[in-house]
Image: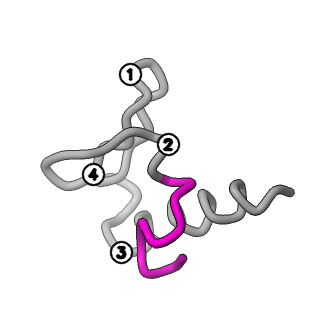
């Protein structure tokens, strides 16, 4: 597994645990990670420091 993949999984895991599975959505068609009242691109999951988990 690549380091980028591990970072993305840790970030996604942290978001789901912190906000709940119902409040974190991956919208594959638009390439968006939706959470709370906003979101970001799915690519942000692979960024170190996106959540406290990385």
Q: In front: 31, or 20?
A: 31
Q: Residue 2: image x %, image y %?
A: 81, 56
- Give the spatial CA distance, label 2 vs label 3: 19 Å
Residue 10 occupies quadrant: bottom right
Dot 2 or dot 1, earlier in sequence: 1
1 over 13 or under it: above or below: above
Numbered disc 1: secondary structure? loop
Residue at image point 38% right, 42% down? 33
Q: Please tell me whether mark 2 sits on a helix, a strand or a loop.
A: helix
In the picture, the disc for residue 9 is none
C-alpha gap between disc 4 and disc 2: 14 Å
Foreground: disc 4 or disc 2: 2
Q: Does the magenta stretch include residue 52?
A: yes
Q: Mark 1 points at which residue?
A: 30
Q: At which x and y percent is residue 23?
A: 29, 54
**Image height check: is 30 above or below 36?**
above
Residue found 42% across the figure and 72% down from its top: 51
Numbered tag placed on residue 43 in the rendering:
2
In the rendered structure, find residue 35 and report the number of the disc placed on it: 4
Find out whether the residues at labels 2 and 1 contact each other: C-beta distance under 8 Å.
Answer: no
What is the C-alpha distance between the residues marked 2 and 1? 12 Å
| In the displayed structure image, the side of residue 35 where residue 50 appears, left or right | right
Mark 4 or mark 1: name the one nearer the start of the chain.
1
The residue that label 3 is drawn on is: 18
Q: Give the range drawn in magenta.
A: 45-54
Q: Tag 2 or tag 4, which sits nearer the N-term?
A: 4
């Amino acid at each position: 597994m690549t380091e980028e993949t591990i970072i993305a999984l840790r970030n996604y895991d942290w978001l789901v645990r912190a906000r709940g599975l119902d409040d974190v959505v991956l919208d594959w068609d638009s390439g968006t990670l939706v959470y709370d009242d906003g979101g970001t691109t799915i690519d942000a999951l692979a960024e170190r420091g996106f959540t406290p988990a990385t």
